[in-house]
Each structure stands twice: as C-alpha cells, then as structure tokens.
Amino acid sequence: MNQRTPLQIFVGRAVLLAAAYAVIDAIINPADTVNYELRHKKRVVYRGITYEDRFDKRMDEHEASDKVFDDCIYDDAKARHRAIKLEKKLIKRDQPKYNIHHTRG
C-alpha cells in the first residue's frame, strides 16, 4: 500500500490552496496595469503606471507636458496593486527627477 505521510498530505493541500488563491486573485485583480519608465539619454527621468488600454493616451499626455524624454520602456500588465507596489519601490530606488511621490521614506 502506498499511504501518504501527513507531510505529503499537508503539502498536497497547500499546493491546491495556492492554486485556488492564484485563480481567485486573477479574477478579483485582473492584470490590467503596466509599469513604465521614461528615459532621457538612457537615464530614468520618470516612473509611472497606467491601465494597459490607456497607455497610448498616457504617453500623449507626457509628450504634451514639460517632461523631457526620448524613450519609454514598459513591462507586462499585472494587477494594479502589484503595479503600485513596484512603482513605489522603483521610485524610491531611482529617485527620477520628474517623480515627486514616493521619493521619501
């Protein structure tokens, strides 16, 4: 007989629970937000987030602003709360000149 040990049963249930959480999280928090950075001469001058379907409009807004940049890099869409967390972390790390939020503390 191949009886599973209590540890094997626990691990199996943990894997199922993690999978269920991932499915529920994807339903509740859709991957709809991208992180992006504006660069000037290869230096990050601004970091931001926007809804994926609004990305082109957001770039138009930046081009109409006083920001000087010559390149934009963006990543894959993710849940908005994850994008916000990443944005804060990267702004604190890089201190881009056009970001005024999240630069302290």
Image: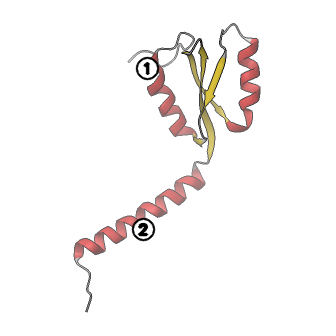
Q: Quickly name the residue at label 2.
A: 16
Numbered disc 1: secondary structure: helix
Residue most extreme to the bottom: 1
Residue 52 position by quadrant: top right
* Up-down relation of residue 72 to residue 35 (above or below): above
Residue 15 is marked as none
At which x and y percent is residue 100? 53, 13
The kind of residue tagged 1 is Lys
Residue most extreme to the front: 41
At which x and y percent is residue 68? 66, 9
In the drawing, does residue 82 fall left or right of residue 33? left
At which x and y percent is residue 58? 72, 25
Q: Quickly name the residue at label 1.
A: 92
The kind of residue tagged 2 is Leu
Image point (48%, 63%), residue name: 20
Residue 16 position by quadrant: bottom left
Image point (59%, 24%), residue name: 48
Question: Between disc 2 and disc 1, whose residue precedes?
Answer: 2
